[in-house]
Amino acid sequence: MIEVQHLTKKFVLSKKEQKERGSGASEAFAVDDVSFKCEPGRVFALLGPNGAGKTTTLRIIASILKPSSGIVKIQGHDVATHSAQARRCMGFLTGSTGLYDRLTAEESIKYFADLFDVPSNLYKERRDKLFGMLGMEEFAGKRIGQLSTGMKQKVSIVRTMIHDPQVVVFDEPTSGLDVITAENIIQLVMDCKAQGKTVLFSSHIMSEVDLLADDLAIIHRGKLIFHDTMDGFRSQMQSVSITKDFIRLIREAEAS
Amino acid sequence: MRHLWIVFKKEMRYTLRDRRTLMVMVVIPTLVFPAIFMITNAVQKSAMEGEVGRRLKVAYLDQGEDDRMLNLFQADTSMKVIVFPDTSGFRAGVRADSFDLALAAGGKIGHQMDFSSSTDVRVWYDVTEELVFERGKLKIDLLSKVMMGERLDSLKLSPSFVEPLKVVQVNTSSMQETIGKMAGGFLPYIFIAFCYMGCMFPAIDLFTGEKERGTIETLLATPVPRWQLLAGKMLVVICSGFTTAILAFLGLFVGMKLGDTLPAPMMEVVLGILSPGFVVTFLLMLLPLVTAFAGLTIPATVYAKSFKEAQSILTPLNFVVITPAIVGMMPGIELNWVTALIPVLNVVLATKDLIAGTLDPLLFGLLMLSLLGVAVVAVLLSFKRFGSERNILRS
């Protein structure tokens, strides 16, 4: 489970940034009093235009960034005070494949398994299962630099899942990927949900959200402007297109 | 600490698979000095052989019959003498390589000369061909000596008459001390430069590279404390700098041996310098120095967004590091209570003394304290930068 309570993140602006913004403020709120809860066995989608604060929120949840105020708990562990325990329960996957090109697929997975303290026998078992499932055996010994984007994405998936996390966070996981490669990710999200894991993903691809999400939150300029179940969102739709309703909500928020 | 070791092992393997780093860390420091020495020696030898064996064309101002200098030059079969009635074409002739040397005495150098005066001998030569000038001057000096003897004989004086005081040099320094003072500054300059280079490239790859590859977020999302991630990576940078410096140093000695540039007795002393005591003291100094270099390069590489940006920050820093090393090579700069506190400079001066065998243990202790202090500050700075959200996720 992920619990986000009154989460705020502000950044101190440099003189150059202050000048660029022209507001004279010395601080900027990337996330402003955001609260939501992601339940096990459900997929939570965090939506928002570019620069809305999605990545900052997810980075705080992954305890890569520290919150300025508010509380984030992963499986009951506060990410600010018990970050190591929180991280152990979580898998984090970003849109960029983010792999070490001079390591082989096998070495990359083993490295992250070791960092997550996965015991050898469990590692072997999970590795065999995931490699078999994704058809990775044929390129397991190849260096990442020699792999195609699709192969790399599979390695990223296994790296994220090798410690069998109960919470999985995806930051725009399909951005920049072709349809076939993106399908691996969509399947992964579905599998995670089926296994009762808590899934949080950010996206701006509405078809994905429509397909995968059980719960939905829309963030704009750091503030949560919508939070409901996907069914709730659908019932409030004023057009036939999710995209159009998403844009409408953003415009309404800007107007207010 | 288990995670630190995991990170270290992975980063070491990753570094050793990088051709660019391997080139800077192993290939260049190992081969550069043997290559330089061997090539220089071969070129020098071939140039010398060619020059000495070459028949020189010498222009000579006609002074009439029985000119002693003309006779002397003509007697040498390695020279072809051409006599000219005046010197008007000498400058142009030498410049156009029509002849190598041109000589004009102020008057005829015969057997009967006025003992109370001396005769000027003008020599036209190309300053870039020093050896040609030396060959001509050798002959003139020889004739001058003979004439001096004749003059003294005619006055019934011994050669000591014109040399009332004779300086006899007695060198109290051992060959090792002499080498230490003469070349001791050059050696540390070399390994300091390589040491810095050895830290720079792995640091860029292991820190800035994480941003460029997009792996930094996934790494920070692991349960490993940040200090262990930093320490694991930093140890690889230190090992790289250390290895590069040692390989450069060994390469230098191998180069001297293979290059055959030093006389045998001097070479024996140079090789004798590599005693266990020297090696231990040298490595002791090197360790905090490399740590300080790693600590200086890492904050820059954590801050930089790309390899190019990291290089543009670290290259000027290279000059800051090298400047004290250059100062240490200057004559008259010695290791004392003040210079022992100045990082890099103190290593250069201490190596000079170490090679000469005159290193003061108290000054060495002070030097170590200074280097350790700088290393600690540099490591803390790295830790601060690596922990800074603004730097680590700057993109």
Image: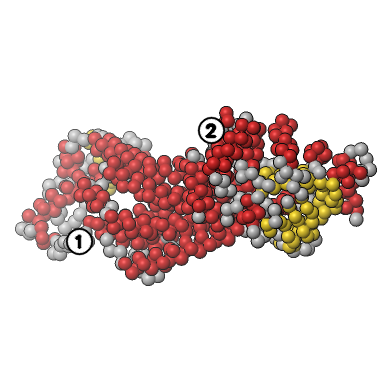
Would you place residue B163 above or below residue A102 in this image? Answer: below
Left or right: A247 in relation to B311: right
Q: Residues within 10 Å of mark 2 (few under 14, many from 20)?
A: few
Residue displayed at 79% across by 56% down = A35
Q: Between A34 and B57, which is closer to the camera in this rendering?
A: A34
Mark on residue B1? none
The outermost residue toward the bottom is B337
Q: Which residue is mark 2?
A: A141
User: Disc 1 residue type?
Assistant: Asn
Left or right: A238 in relation to B317: right
Q: Contact, CB < 8 Å: mark 1 with mark 2?
A: no
Place of residue B330 in the rendered image (x, y in percent of width and height, measured from the top left): 37, 60
The outermost residue toward the left is B156
The outermost residue toward the top is A138
Left or right: A71 in relation to B267: right
Place of residue B167 in the rendered image (x, y in percent of width and height, measured from the top left): 17, 62
Residue displayed at 7% across by 59% down = B157
Place of residue B343 in the rendered image (x, y in percent of width and height, measured from the top left): 43, 63
Q: Of helix, strand and loop, which one carries label 2?
A: loop
